[in-house]
Image (cartoon, helix red, strand yellow):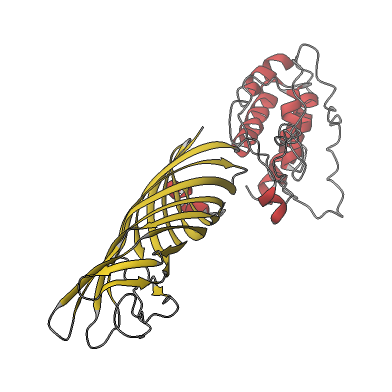
Amino acid sequence: MSKFSHTTGGMFAAVICAALTATGAPVQAQGSAEALAQCAPERAAATRLACFERAAFIEAAARFGSIHNVFGGCMARLRETDRLACFETQTPRIVQPAAAPPLPAVTLRPAQEPQAARPPGAAPAAPPSAAPSGMARTAPPPPRTGQPSPRTAQALPAPADGAARAGDSGWLATLGRDAAASGLYLRGQLGYAAGLDADIKDTPPSGTVIACLARGTRCGGELDDVGSSVTFGAGLGYRWNRQVRFDVTLDYRPGFAVDDSDQATPFAANYKGDITSLVTLVNAYWDLPVDLGQYAGWLGRVRPWVGLGLGVARNELDDLSYSQRLASGATARGRLPGSTATSFAWQAGLGLGIELLPQLTLDFGYRYLDAGDIKTKAGRLTDSVAGVLPVGEAKGELKSHEFQVGLRYQL
């Protein structure tokens, strides 16, 4: 609706109403109010105003007299918001529109210009409190544009005890406990671990010539290949807030095995032996907050995370059996005595958590795990060719890249 139509319509209605008032015909203000009340259910503010203006003009022309004093004054208002507020004050509200948007203010004249003078003989517009007798009192007019609605200006509920406030940011929001999200959870996972170079080297005993682990000359040999293993894990955790959680895990890895040859020349010896590993870790995780905006959808259930853990590992290396083809054509065989090592372990990893249900999360993760030492025991071995030989301790490290899939259940 243009500036011209707003101004002309308002002034024209006011003049007609003033002229009709002079006739002195009887007025039925209550009937007019009922007709205009039919506009109240309109949800859109602009549609509601158009209905009010149309009905008010027809009623003013049909009923004459003091109808101008009630509704004609609304038509004389230049601002749309003023006219709408006037109509709603004078008209009973039959149906309260749900969350109807406020009508934006439209200034039809520059702010410095005065309002147009009322036509001669026109009565002043009735104030909001001057509703004619018999008309129902209604809710106050909606606020002007830029002022908060009474419904939206209510105080927001206080956040849960210990939860991070909306104004908090950075480490305060990350570290603050969130009572609504915190709680215990159980976890379980299966995985695959690919062993890295173990660097198993021996320490020859004093006064003997032991090198390349068990036989030959001092050559500085080492064993690297420990293969791979399946992993089985379980744990108990506690979520501190929506971003930070902790857990204690126990992982069993039964499938590693030494299968490698030393660097003795010209005849290398091959060694074989199984490794069983049990690792206990205390882990901390940060679930990264990711805002996907309009692309959220089901992706809003995906939460990337990073984690770090410290703990202890118990690695058991069985006896290492070896065989070596000698220059004479004979094959020497024997066993290096195995041993168990308990040492410090640590891990660092990252992954994705996918919320399947409010309490159930599917986890995909990768981690680098250093499970500490693996070793044989110093002592004596019986070689099929050389007889009884003293041997020193052989030691290496059990390290692996691991890929895991599991479930977390919030208790």
Please determine whether, in this image, residue 269 is positioned above or below residue 191. below
Give residue 133's quadrant in the image.
Answer: top right
Q: Image check: 54 left or right of 231?
A: right
- Residue reaching furthest bottom? 266
Q: Nearer the viewer, residue 222 or 337?
A: 337
Residue 123 pos. (x, y %)? 85, 29
Q: Nearer the viewer, residue 13 or 156?
A: 156
Please determine whether, in this image, residue 2 is positioned above or below residue 319. above
What is the count of numbered marks?
0
Residue 353 pos. (x, y %)? 45, 49
Q: Image check: 186 left or right of 39?
A: left
- Residue reaching furthest top? 134
Q: Image check: 247 left or right of 376?
A: right
On the question of residue 199 being in view, the answer is no
Give residue 69's quadrant in the image.
Answer: top right
Residue 60 pos. (x, y %)? 70, 26
Identified at 85% across, 28% down, the residue is 127
Q: Nearer the viewer, residue 311 or 391?
A: 391
Give residue 91's quadrant in the image.
Answer: top right
Q: Image check: 148 left or right of 35?
A: right
Identified at 77% across, 21% down, the residue is 65
Residue 403 pos. (x, y %)? 37, 57
Q: Nearer the viewer, residue 296 or 117?
A: 296
On the question of residue 104 being in view, the answer is yes
